[in-house]
């Protein structure tokens, strides 16, 4: 599949004002990549992102693409096409374009590229968040798996600028990473993935980390001071995830509805102008004929 071109955010997208529209294909690395957080999503990755931000590491997360800068999904789609379909190439230059503004990266879909990222950023330390596989599976079923299959997102993707980039990328990732069936393969792939990362990363560069352990092991590993008077973040609960997604669907559908209203009003104004112009021309023609007839009478 051909790489999809970047298009700017429509002016009518007034219900998602915080979405940016940066074309990452024109970007480059601005800061060094220092942390690769390669734990699967729903293992505390959103909480880890908040913790890393507190420690001074700007961290990329799935929400960076889904609700912050949707055009990022175009480059993620390029990366997925290169990995799973053999279409195009996606190497260090492209990773720097996509992630060059960040010092850390976590969550889906980056974890599909664990080996690529470790090779692209060999100096980066690796944090591997984890949790019990059964509780992880149950949480993922009700959040990301639900989101990947959700009719509301599929509908928004047909009419909204941001959703039209996000939904195909999410669907491609979710299908390929879980070998076509998350419900059947999720727990097996969980075990396989963690074994792969442990083999890939030298032990001195790897921290296996449960978010419930708090600041100490994370700060020790990253040589960062423990934030005074701050408890370690706990964010993105199941309820928060679902409500955020449903709210985003509503806002994106409102964008589409508003665009239709603007389009209809514009067409109406054009039609009225044309009718008015036609009517004026007719009146001028009639006056012209009447004037000619009047002059001819003398």
Image (tube, rainbow, N blue to C red):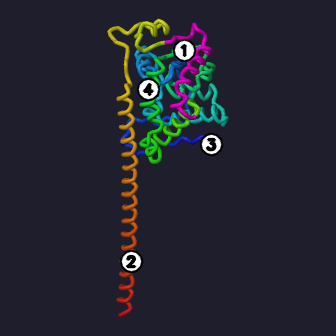
Mark 1 or mark 3: whose residue is earlier in sequence: 3
Q: Name the residue under label 4.
A: 138
SS at mark 2?
helix
* Camera-side residue of 37 and 194: 194
Q: Which residue is found at the position 45% from the left and 48% from the top? A: 159
Crowding near the residue tagged with mark 3, few <14, some 14–19, many ≥20 C-alpha atoms within 10 Å: few
Q: Mark 2 points at which residue?
A: 282
* Camera-side residue of 269 and 43: 43
Q: Which residue is found at the position 40% from the left and 42% from the top? A: 252
SS at mark 3?
loop
Q: Name the residue under label 3.
A: 2
Q: Which residue is found at the position 59% from the left and 25% from the top? A: 113
What is the spatial separation of the Cα atoms under label 3 and label 4, in whole angstroms? 36 Å
* Camera-side residue of 29 and 216: 216
Q: Vertical placement of 7 versus 114: above or below?
A: below
Q: Point out the stretch of residues depicted in magenta.
A: 180-208
Query: Which numbered mark, 2 or 1, is in the foreground of this view?
Result: 1
What is the spatial separation of the Cα atoms under label 3 and label 2, in whole angstroms? 52 Å
Mark 1 or mark 4: whose residue is earlier in sequence: 1
Query: Which numbered mark, 4 or 2, is in the foreground of this view?
Result: 4
Q: Is residue 191 magenta?
A: yes
What is the spatial separation of the Cα atoms under label 2 and label 1, in whole angstroms? 77 Å
């Amino acid at each position: 599949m051909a790489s999809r071109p970047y298009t700017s955010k429509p002016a009518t997208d007034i219900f998602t004002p915080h979405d940016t529209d940066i074309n990452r294909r024109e970007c480059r690395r601005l800061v060094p990549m220092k942390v690769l957080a390669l734990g699967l999503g729903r293992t505390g990755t959103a909480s880890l992102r908040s913790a890393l931000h507190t420690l001074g590491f700007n961290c990329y997360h799935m929400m960076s693409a889904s609700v912050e800068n949707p055009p990022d999904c175009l480059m993620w789609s390029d990366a997925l096409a290169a990995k799973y379909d053999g279409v195009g190439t996606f190497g260090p230059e492209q990773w720097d374009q996509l992630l060059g503004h960040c010092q850390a990266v976590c969550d889906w879909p980056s974890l599909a590229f664990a080996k690529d990222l470790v090779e692209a950023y060999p100096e980066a330390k690796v944090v591997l968040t984890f949790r019990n596989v059964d509780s992880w599976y149950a949480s993922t079923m009700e959040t990301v798996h639900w989101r990947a299959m959700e009719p509301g997102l599929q509908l928004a993707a047909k009419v909204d600028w941001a959703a039209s980039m996000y939904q195909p990328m999410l669907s491609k990732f979710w299908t390929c990473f879980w070998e076509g069936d998350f419900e059947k393969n999720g727990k097996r792939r969980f075990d396989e993935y963690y074994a792969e990362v442990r083999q890939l990363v030298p032990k001195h560069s790897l921290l296996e980390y449960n978010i419930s352990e708090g600041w100490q092991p994370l700060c020790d590993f990253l040589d960062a001071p423990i934030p005074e008077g701050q408890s370690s973040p706990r964010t993105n609960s199941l309820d928060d995830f679902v409500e955020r997604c449903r709210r985003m669907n509503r806002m994106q559908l409102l964008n589409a509805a508003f665009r239709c209203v603007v389009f209809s009003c514009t067409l109406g104004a054009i039609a009225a102008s044309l009718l008015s112009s036609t009517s004026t021309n007719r009146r001028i023609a009639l006056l012209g004929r009447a004037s000619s007839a009047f002059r001819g009478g003398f």
